[in-house]
Every structure is written in structure tokens, then in C-alpha cells.
């Protein structure tokens, strides 16, 4: 899993930012992106090792097709002034990138745990969300370490049905997020500010 652009984990975490202005001129091989996603799927934690996370990688024309679908669905679902002001420019910006990773959960393994341990039923869906978030973060951080920019979008449930139809995704899978990636083509859309860590971190017994 080593890379010619290896950086420390600390550096990778710091490098990861939300970057929306992305181009499709990508030098990182598709095989490397697949390797990163595979590594994250294998090694990201999940409740009771249920491994509920699922991904669908779309690049080049398939990526652009996804955002064409999002455009069509949003245009048909949202009031025209809101679509023109908020949806249309953003969807066109995401379409200009190279790829999109669709993050799903398959609830079937969790449902088996629910049957075995019904006292945990109210907690397991939240824990499954936690696991998917860690999967997303792992992929995002590794892509950032390769020099790629990403942003995380949530056009679900608006696009769920069309995406399932276009890419033959099982109807039982739950779409959680869409990670757009490509070569950075501009700075972040807003500066990142930091609340003092002292307000957010507490230690005892040191």
C-alpha cells in the first residue's frame, strides 16, 4: 500500500480539506484509487466487524453521468429559483471533477446482530453510520495523501433510485454520501478557522 508520495499520517490528516474546485486532469492511476478504496474497506472498523460499508467508484464518463442524473433529478424536484441559485452551479462544478465515490451501507449484517442481541437494536444503526463515516474519512485522507482534492456531498435521497437503476445497485443498500475527487483547481471556498483545542480536549490522570 506504499506510495511514491508517502507522507506521515499527521501530515495526511492536516492536508485533507474540502476542495470543491476540481479538474478531471488526474495523474493518479485508477488502479491506485481502487487500491485505496479496497484498503479502506478491508481495514476500517465496523460494529461487531459486520463490514457494512459498500462503495461504487465512478470515473470519467460514468462520473459525469452521475452528475447529469443529479442535475435532472434536482431540476425536477426543486423550485426553479432555488435550483438556479444553489443546485445548478454546484452540480456543474462537481461534474467538472474526475470521479465520484458513492458510499453505501448494507444493513443486512446489522439486522443479523439485531436478531441475536435485540437490546442493541436502537444503537446499531447509529454505529453503522459511525463506521461509514470512518470509511469515508480513511478514503478521503489517503486520496489527499496522493495529491487529490475531494469534497463530500449528500444528494441522497434525491438520487437514490436513479443511481440504483443506472449502476445496478442492490435496492437494500442505503446511500450515505458522494465523494467527489479530482485535481485541485482552486483554493478552498472558505478559510478554515480553528476553535482553541483547550476548549474541546480534556485530559485526566496524566
Image (spheres, rainbow, N blue to C red):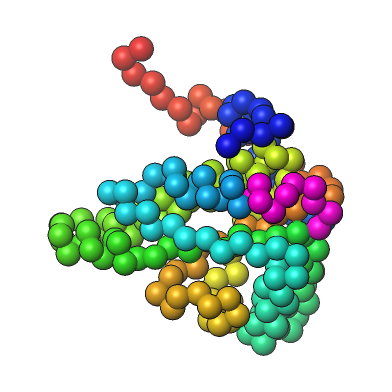
Residue 175 in percent (x, y) is at 50, 68
Q: Is residue 129 left or right of residue 188?
A: left
Q: Is-magenta flag for residue 168? A: no
Find residue 126 and report its image quarter. bottom left
Q: Is residue 21 visible?
A: no
Residue 154 in percent (x, y) is at 58, 64
Q: Is residue 51 visible?
A: yes
Residue 172 in percent (x, y) is at 40, 74
Q: Residue at x 20, y 56 (%)?
A: 120
Residue 198 in percent (x, y) is at 51, 24
Magenta part of the chain: 24-33
Q: Residue at x 81, y 58 (%)?
A: 24
Question: Does 191 appear above or below 105?
Answer: above
Q: Residue furthest bottom?
A: 76
Q: Is-magenta flag for residue 26? A: yes
Q: Pick whichever, 57 or 196, lies toward us.
A: 57
Q: Pick whichever, 189 or 96, lies toward us.
A: 96
Q: Residue at x 45, y 54 (%)?
A: 132
Q: Is residue 143 left or right of residue 107?
A: right
Q: Residue furthest top?
A: 206
Find residue 92 and report its image quarter. bottom right
Q: Residue at x 61, y 62 (%)?
A: 57
**How many marks on residues?**
0
Amino acid at each position: 500500500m506504499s506510495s511514491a508520495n508517502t507522507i506521515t499520517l499527521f501530515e495526511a490528516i492536516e492536508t485533507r480539506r474540502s476542495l470543491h474546485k476540481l479538474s478531471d486532469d488526474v495523474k493518479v492511476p485508477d488502479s491506485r484509487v481502487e487500491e485505496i478504496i479496497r484498503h479502506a474497506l478491508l481495514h476500517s472498523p465496523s460494529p461487531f466487524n459486520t463490514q457494512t460499508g459498500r462503495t461504487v467508484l465512478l470515473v470519467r464518463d460514468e462520473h459525469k453521468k452521475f452528475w447529469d442524473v443529479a442535475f435532472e433529478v434536482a431540476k425536477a424536484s426543486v423550485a426553479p429559483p432555488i435550483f438556479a441559485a444553489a443546485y445548478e452551479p454546484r452540480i456543474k462544478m462537481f461534474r467538472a471533477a474526475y470521479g465520484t465515490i458513492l458510499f453505501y451501507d448494507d444493513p443486512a449484517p446489522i439486522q443479523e446482530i439485531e436478531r441475536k442481541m435485540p437490546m442493541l437494536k436502537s444503537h446499531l444503526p447509529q454505529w453503522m453510520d459511525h463506521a461509514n463515516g470512518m470509511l469515508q474519512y480513511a478514503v478521503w485522507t489517503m486520496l489527499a495523501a496522493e495529491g487529490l482534492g475531494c469534497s463530500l456531498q449528500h444528494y441522497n435521497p434525491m438520487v437514490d433510485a436513479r443511481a440504483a437503476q443506472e449502476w445496478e445497485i442492490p435496492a437494500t443498500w442505503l446511500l450515505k454520501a458522494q465523494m467527489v475527487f479530482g485535481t485541485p483547481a482552486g483554493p478552498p471556498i472558505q478559510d478554515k478557522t480553528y476553535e482553541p483545542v483547550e476548549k474541546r480536549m480534556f485530559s485526566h490522570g496524566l
